Image: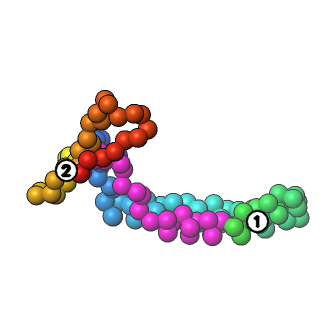
Amino acid sequence: MLRHGGAEVYRITGARRGLQEDVRGRQRRYVISMGVRTISVILTVVLWNVERYVALGTLVLGALLPYVAVVIANAGRENAPSLPGTFTPAATRPVLTAGPAGTPQSTPQPRSTDEPEGQHTESA
């Protein structure tokens, strides 16, 4: 990236190019594309009776290039470069395991050893 004084300026941020610089670049690409189109149309006329296949190729190029040039010129501004994330997620809250206050928790009653297995009775 060069400035008017010829000294090179280095970018140290992830900021996008300025709007004026972006428009100037798109205009430059469009003018170059239209110059290539003009040359291809002139070559079509010159080569029509000399080399018909090359003339047809330049004719196709001259017909398709305006569409491509307009799409490229109207592509808009470049995407902002990816910047390091500044979002820090909130700390996770611990999950409450106890029931609401004031209600007794149901705890499993220990089995007595004198009951036969499979005939468990609960005491209330």
Q: Amino acid at mark 2?
A: Gln
Q: Which mark is residue 104?
A: none
Residue topped by disc 1: 60
Q: Is residue 7 left or right of residue 51?
A: left
Residue at position x 23%, y 44% in the image: 107
Q: Secondary structure at mark 2?
A: loop
Say whether residue 5 is visible: no
Q: Residues within 10 Å of mark 1 (few under 14, many from 20)?
A: some
Say whether residue 104 is visible: yes
Q: x, y (%) of residue 11? A: 28, 44
Q: Are marks 1 and 2 in contact (CB under 8 Å)?
A: no
Residue at position x 82%, y 62% in the image: 55
Q: Amino acid at mark 1?
A: Val
Residue topped by disc 2: 105
In this rendered view, identify the residue nearer to me: 49 or 88.
88
Could you give the CA–CA distance between mark 1 and mark 2, rounded to whole angstroms? Answer: 83 Å
Q: x, y (%) of residue 106? A: 23, 49
In this rendered view, identify the residue nearer to me: 114 or 109.
114
Q: Residues within 10 Å of mark 2 (few under 14, many from 20)?
A: few
In this rendered view, identify the residue nearer to me: 29 or 117.
117
For residue 24, above or below residue 91:
below
Which residues are drawn in magenta? 65-87
Q: How many marks?
A: 2
Q: Is residue 111 left or right of residue 36?
A: left
Residue 48 belongs to magenta span: no
- Tell me the quarter of the picture where residue 84 sits: top left
Marks 1, 2: nearer the viewer: 2
Q: x, y (%) of residue 34? A: 59, 66
Identify the main secondary structure in magenta. loop
